[in-house]
Every structure is written in structure tokens, then in C-alpha cells.
């Protein structure tokens, strides 16, 4: 383990090394193997470190067949000593998040016996999968409070290498995946866990922890959360959204919920009024046309409105066929509908209509719709009437 500097000191930001070899993998990615490295490779739910080797960007790090490969944008110059520098902000973020995960998982297990079966550290948030099928708000709040209390107490976090016999001395949170070279990450009297990730020296450096939500995943509960600087980042994002909503709704933040509920009530009223207007519009169109085929051209109406109106029309006049057309700004849309007692091959008419406007559409024997390039609605109706005749 001597060549893995991130295990000797997770706070190592720069280092020097010699180039052992370099090459390209099967996909053509350049990589370099060094005598030692501070770059953490992907593993145990934690992403790899990024940074530079002699000024060349490191875009990935993986441990393959016992060697750590640094994937680089271009090959290194042979025979030169290597100076490496990791992206410290990224590394420390991963240290905060990983420590927070240990604390949260231990808190769930201590309070409710919910074991963590998997862990994922994403770009913005983290998740753990708990071995339970339900989680209440009260349980989540209590666990979050315990986790933040442990963080505030600034307990030490340290790692220890042990062998298979020594492991019996510790009450581990989950079974080990290896039998030799066992690395324990320990928060005394709280968490004992086999882990190969990087962590800060104390719980206080995790900053704070916030559970964002949870959902059921098959027979598990997936909990989403953030720690440290990510808590502030999400707070800033949410605060910006609240401020913008406060301006748009002309209401203080504490009144936003009631303002939104009021708007939703108004929206429902407007939709109901819109439905009533469509019913009146349908009745007027039927009253003004005595023929079996009724057509009308509208300006800037959505296809959804035409469909809704068509259903109202055929419901009120089951013996008629309706050809509804909307002239929009840059296209023409249509809906053809027939009552259950009316005659007409709507699919055939639609096929010809789409050829006229070079459009696309579809539907059933009772209702078809489509759209295409713009043309005057009256000319379109005349062309369809000729086809029908």
C-alpha cells in the first residue's frame, strides 16, 4: 500500500513520482502508471480524483490488475520526473460526502436497525439504499438530528489496517468483502466499517448533513442526501428559486404556499370556464350549420383545443362529420371527427389532407388529427371537400 499516498494522508495535494509505463487501453485512452500516486481511483461508491500530471489533465483513475492507471489527455514525456497535483476541491468534497454517508448509515442502524446495502456518490447528491420497505418522516428527522449531532461533536475519524483475526475485535456495520489487507474506517463508539475511501480526520469536517428525500426501490428505501459544501450549494439554489417566485407571485416567502394554492384554484376555475365556453361554441356551430358535414377555420388554436371541441360536437350531433382547421403562425393543424351515426372514411380523408400540407398525423375511425405546412384554411377545406365529393 506504500504507493497509495491517499491512504497514508488523504490531505496530500501534490506529490512527485517516476513514470513506470504508459500506454493506451482497448478504447484508445492514454494512461500512465506511476511509482506512487495521491490520485484516488474509482471504488467503493466513491468517484476518482482529477487533476494534472506535469500539467497534463487527468480525466480518470482506475485500479486494474493491481496497478493504478491515470487516464490522461495526452502522453507524458518519457524520462522526466512526474509532479502530480490533485483537484483538492473535488477530493475534499468526496471526503465530506463519504464521511457523511458513514455517519448517516450508522445513525439509521443505531436508531432503527436499518442496514445500508449500497451507496452512490453522485455529482450533486448522494444516495444510500436501506434494507427496509418503508421510512417515515419522523424516523428520517430523528436520524438526521443524530447524524448532525455526531458531526457537531467533532469526533475523530481514523483508519486502521487489520488482519482477519483482529477483525473479531470490532463490531462491524456490514460484512467485509475482503479477507486480507482489511482497512477499517472508525468513528469511536459509533461506527466501525470496512472501507477503502478517503475521509477527513474528524466528523466536524463533514460540515453538516441534510436528507433531501426518499423513495421505494423494489424492497428497499433509497435515501437522497447531501453533506458539507453541497448543503450550502443546494440552499443557495433553493433560495434563488424562492426569491424569484416571491417576486413573480408578489408575496413574501412564508406566503408562497397559500399564493400557489390560490393560483391553482384560479386555474381550475379558468379551465372550467373554458370548458363551458367550448360547449357554447359547439352548440353555436351546430345550430349555424344544417348539413351533414360541418367545417370551420380557427386562428391560433391548439390541437388539444380542436380535439376537445370535436368530441363535444360529435357528442351533441351524432349524425354529423366535423372538419376543424387551425391557422397557426407557422403551420396548419386539423381535426376531423364524426358522430357515431355519421358516414365518412376519416382515415382516407386524413391521408389526402396530409399530402396537401406535407404533414404528419394519425387517429381512429372516429377522430383523426394532423399538421403540416401553413396554407389558408379556407383553401384547405375546399380541397378536402373536393376529395370527399
Image: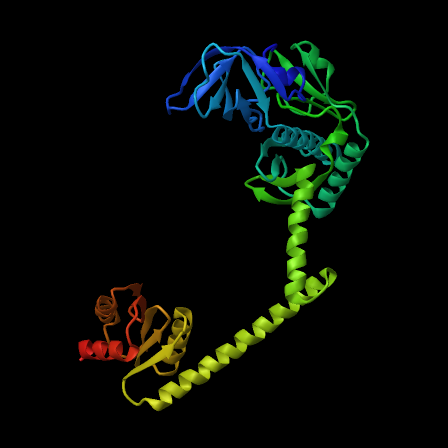
Q: Classify the position of the N terminus by image quarter.
A: top right
Query: How far from the left and from the top, in percent, is residue 368?
Result: 31, 69
Would residue 39 appear left or right of 334 to someone viewing this image?
right
Would residue 301 appear left or right of 376 to someone viewing this image?
right
Q: What sort of colour scheme is used for the picture?
A: rainbow
> Which residue is most to the right?
153
Q: Quadrant of residue 9?
A: top right
Q: Quadrant of residue 153?
A: top right
Asked if one can make out residue 154 in the rendered structure from this viewpoint, the answer is yes
Front in this rendered view, residue 86 or 231: 86
Would residue 174 appear left or right of 283 to someone viewing this image?
right
Residue 254 higher or lower than 310, as above or below: above
Query: How far from the left and from the top, in percent, is residue 116?
Result: 64, 32
Asked if one can make out residue 211 in the rendered structure from this viewpoint, the answer is no
Residue 352 higher or lower than 239, as above or below: below
Query: Which residue is located at x 62 percent, y 23 percent?
Result: 197
Query: Which residue is located at x 74 percent, y 44 percent?
Result: 141
Would residue 279 appear left or right of 113 to someone viewing this image?
left
Q: Classify the position of the C terminus by image quarter.
A: bottom left
Query: How far from the left and from the top, in percent, is residue 188?
Result: 78, 22
Front in this rendered view, residue 269 or 50: 50
**How many tags in the picture?**
0
Q: Quadrant of residue 209?
A: top right
Query: Which residue is located at x 41 percent, y 78 percent?
Result: 312
Query: How far from the left and from the top, in percent, is residue 62?
Result: 50, 21
Amino acid at each position: 500500500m506504500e504507493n497509495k499516498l491517499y491512504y497514508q494522508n488523504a490531505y496530500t495535494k501534490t506529490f512527485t513520482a517516476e513514470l513506470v509505463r504508459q500506454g493506451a487501453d482497448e478504447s484508445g485512452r492514454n494512461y500512465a502508471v506511476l511509482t506512487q500516486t495521491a490520485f484516488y481511483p474509482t471504488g467503493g461508491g466513491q468517484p476518482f480524483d482529477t487533476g494534472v500530471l506535469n500539467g497534463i489533465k487527468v480525466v480518470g483513475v482506475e485500479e486494474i490488475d493491481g496497478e493504478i492507471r491515470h487516464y490522461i489527455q495526452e502522453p507524458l514525456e518519457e524520462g522526466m520526473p512526474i509532479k502530480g497535483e490533485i483537484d483538492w476541491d473535488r477530493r475534499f468534497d468526496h471526503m465530506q460526502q463519504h464521511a457523511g454517508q458513514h455517519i448517516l448509515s450508522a445513525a439509521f442502524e443505531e436508531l432503527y436497525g436499518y442496514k445500508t446495502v449500497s451507496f452512490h456518490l453522485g455529482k450533486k447528491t448522494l444516495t444510500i439504499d436501506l434494507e427496509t420497505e418503508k421510512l417515515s418522516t419522523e424516523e428520517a428527522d430523528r436520524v438526521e438530528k443524530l447524524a448532525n449531532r455526531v458531526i457537531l461533536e467533532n469526533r475523530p475519524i481514523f483508519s486502521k489496517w487489520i488482519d482477519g483475526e483482529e477483525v473479531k475485535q470490532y463490531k462491524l456495520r456490514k460484512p467485509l468483502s475482503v479477507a486480507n489487507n482489511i482497512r477499517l474506517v472508525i468513528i469511536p463508539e459509533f461506527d466501525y466499517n470496512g472501507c477503502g475511501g478517503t475521509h477527513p480526520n474528524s466528523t466536524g469536517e463533514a460540515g453538516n448533513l441534510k436528507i433531501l428525500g426518499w423513495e421505494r426501490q423494489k424492497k428497499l428505501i433509497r435515501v437522497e442526501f447531501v453533506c458539507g459544501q453541497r448543503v450550502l450549494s443546494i440552499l443557495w439554489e433553493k433560495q434563488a428559486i424562492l426569491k424569484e417566485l416571491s417576486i413573480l407571485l408578489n408575496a413574501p416567502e412564508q406566503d408562497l404556499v397559500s399564493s400557489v394554492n390560490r393560483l391553482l384554484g384560479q386555474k381550475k376555475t379558468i379551465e372550467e370556464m373554458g370548458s363551458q365556453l367550448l360547449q357554447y361554441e359547439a352548440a353555436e356551430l351546430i345550430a349555424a350549420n344544417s348539413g351533414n358535414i360541418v367545417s370551420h377555420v380557427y386562428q391560433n388554436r391548439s390541437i388539444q383545443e380542436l380535439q376537445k371541441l370535436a368530441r363535444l360536437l360529435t357528442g351533441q350531433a351524432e349524425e354529423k362529420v366535423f372538419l376543424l382547421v387551425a391557422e397557426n403562425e407557422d403551420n396548419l393543424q386539423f381535426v376531423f371527427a364524426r358522430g357515431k351515426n355519421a358516414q365518412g372514411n376519416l382515415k382516407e380523408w386524413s391521408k389526402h389532407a396530409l399530402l396537401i400540407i406535407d404533414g404528419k398525423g394519425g387517429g381512429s375511425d372516429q377522430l383523426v388529427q394532423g399538421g403540416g405546412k401553413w396554407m389558408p384554411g379556407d383553401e384547405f377545406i375546399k380541397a378536402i371537400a373536393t376529395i370527399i365529393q
